[in-house]
Image (spheres, helix red, strand yellow):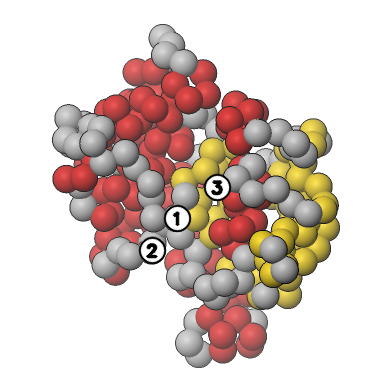
């Protein structure tokens, strides 16, 4: 479904990604792990078109995304729930969700069907549909950011640090919903610093350090890998 090949991204003289190779199969949830500054967010931003790679290739279902603007990538099926949520605080929950749909296909007869699916996954959003985004808790805002991305009916869902800034109980609640989402066989690339949570949801994972992939494999294998245990699981 999604493939990055020899991807390199630079910010001036700083090389953020150094020849990254990564694949996500259709219906698979893959985690991208690493410390702050490893290049995880840069990789998602390159896939969604928010930064331009210096070299390399990004393919969606075999078709190159090179030179394609972010809005065209969204219409092609890339949905990005960014770090720190980036919801519209002055819009209601319902209006935020509608933005996620209209940005890629406009208002349509199936809008209510999509809303019902998001509300079934995140019942709190249904209860708060008329509230402004600023009035939601951090966990509810994260649910809204994910729901807004799902309204686009993506082929690939990019999730950037969904547990960031959340209290442990709220982070756990969000990840329960993500596990449910992964079981629906939607294609997900998940960036997360909470390694244990990410590996519990994803079937495979890549470890990114200083812009390079240093490990990859099945989540169960990486959970027991000495390097992962020492650096990311506190063992």
CA gap, disc 2 and disc 1: 8 Å
- Which residue is at 49% across, 55% downward? 160
Mark 1 or mark 3, whichever is nearer to me: 1
- Which residue is at 79% across, 33% downward? 63
Question: Is there CB contact under 8 Å for labels 2 and 3?
Answer: no
Horizontal side of 168 relative to 11 (left or right) equals left
Question: Is there CB contact under 8 Å for labels 2 and 1?
Answer: yes
Neighbor class of circle 2 (other Cα within 10 Å; few <14, some 14-19, many 20+) is: some
Which numbered circle lies on residue 83? 1
Residue 42 in the image, given as x and y percentages of width and height? 61, 58
- Which residue is at 66% across, 75% downward? 209
Which numbered circle lies on residue 158? 3
Horizontal side of 173 relative to 47 (left or right) equals left
Neighbor class of circle 1 (other Cα within 10 Å; few <14, some 14-19, many 20+) is: some
Pick out the residue farthest to the front: 12
Circle 2 — which element? loop
Answer with mark 2 or mark 3, whichever residue precedes in sequence.
Answer: 3
Q: Nearer the viewer, residue 34 or 215?
A: 34
Question: Is there CB contact under 8 Å for labels 1 and 3?
Answer: no
Pick out the residue farthest to the top: 109
Which quarter of the figure has residue 100?
Answer: top left
Residue 16 in the image, given as x and y percentages of width and height? 68, 66
Q: Nearer the viewer, residue 2 or 83?
A: 83
- Residue 140's place in the image compared with 210, above or below, is above
- Which residue is at 46% across, 35% downward? 150
Which numbered circle lies on residue 164? 2
Q: Nearer the viewer, residue 109 or 105?
A: 105
Q: Quadrant of the N terminus?
A: top right
Residue 148 in the image, given as x and y percentages of width and height? 40, 36
Answer with mark 2 or mark 1, whichever residue precedes in sequence.
Answer: 1
């Amino acid at each position: 479904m999604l493939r990055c090949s020899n991807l390199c991204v630079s910010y001036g003289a700083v090389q953020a990604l150094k020849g990254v190779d990564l694949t996500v199969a259709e219906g698979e949830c893959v985690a991208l792990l690493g410390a702050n500054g490893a290049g995880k967010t840069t990789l998602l931003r390159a896939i969604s078109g928010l930064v331009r790679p210096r070299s390399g290739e990004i393919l969606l279902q075999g078709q190159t995304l090179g030179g394609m603007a972010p809005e065209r990538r969204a219409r092609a099926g890339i949905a990005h729930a960014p770090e720190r949520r980036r919801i519209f605080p002055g819009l209601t929950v319902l209006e935020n969700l509608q933005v996620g749909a209209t940005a890629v296909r406009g208002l349509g007869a199936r809008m209510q069907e999509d809303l019902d699916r998001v509300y079934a996954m995140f019942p709190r959003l249904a209860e708060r549909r008329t509230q402004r985004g600023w009035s939601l808790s951090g966990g509810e805002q994260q649910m809204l950011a994910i729901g807004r991305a799902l309204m686009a009916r993506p082929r690939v869902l990019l999730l950037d640090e969904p547990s960031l800034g959340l209290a442990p109980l709220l982070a756990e609640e969000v990840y329960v919903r993500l596990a449910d989402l992964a079981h629906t066989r939607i294609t997900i690339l998940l960036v997360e610093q909470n390694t244990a949570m990410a590996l519990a949801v994803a079937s495979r994972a890549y470890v990114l350090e200083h812009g390079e992939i240093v490990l990859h494999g099945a989540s169960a294998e990486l959970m027991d890998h000495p390097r992962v245990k020492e650096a990311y699981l506190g063992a």
